[in-house]
Amino acid sequence: MGVKEEGSATVKSDFYKVTTTGGMTRTLNGKKWAEINGQLPNEVVQNVVRLKPELDTRQFKALKALNPQQYAIVAQAVTSKPRKSSVKIERLEAGN
């Protein structure tokens, strides 16, 4: 019966209904994008590719010691929440 590259295909018979679904995963090569995005109108660039700011936690924590004033500015845009705690229990055999 085959599979569509994207979307679903259904075949029905007297006793069965079979549906296949295909899809594509798409990722953006950042280096290549940097090379080519200047060839497109700004409107296309903004509509097709989303750029998501991401915090470098290691650098953020280091900034606190290196430059507390700049840290305070960046910290205004950072939300910090505690993670779930974890507990690990291991059974030790006799003699260990």
Image (spheres, helix red, strand yellow):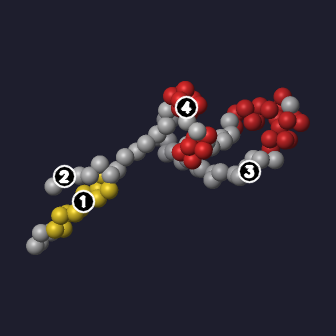
**What residue sits 84% from the left and 41% below the top?**
73
| Residue tagged 4 | 39
**1 in relation to 56, above or below:** below
Quadrant of the rendered image containing residue 40: top right
Q: Badge 3: few (under 14), some or many (20 or more) residues near its Cα, within 10 Å? A: few
Name which residue type carries label 2. Gly
| Residue tagged 1 | 9
**How far across and how far down the image is residue 46, in percent?**
60, 44
| Residue tagged 2 | 2
Name which residue type carries label 1. Ala
* First of labels 4, 3 by sequence position: 4
Name which residue type carries label 3. Thr
Question: Which is nearer the eye, 54 or 41?
Answer: 41
Residues at marks 2 and 4, CA–CA distance in whole angstroms: 38 Å
Nearer to us of marks 2 and 3 is: 2
* First of labels 2, 1 by sequence position: 2
* First of labels 2, 4 by sequence position: 2
Question: Which is nearer the eye, 30 or 94?
Answer: 30
Name which residue type carries label 4. Gln
Residues at marks 3 and 1, CA–CA distance in whole angstroms: 45 Å
| Residue tagged 3 | 79
Nearer to us of marks 1 and 4 is: 4
Residues at marks 1 and 4, CA–CA distance in whole angstroms: 37 Å
SS assignment at label 2: loop
Nearer to us of marks 3 and 1 is: 1
The answer to whether the residue labelled 3 contacts the one labelled 1, judged by CB atoms less than 8 Å apart, is no
**What residue sits 75% from the left and 36% below the top?**
60
SS assignment at label 3: loop
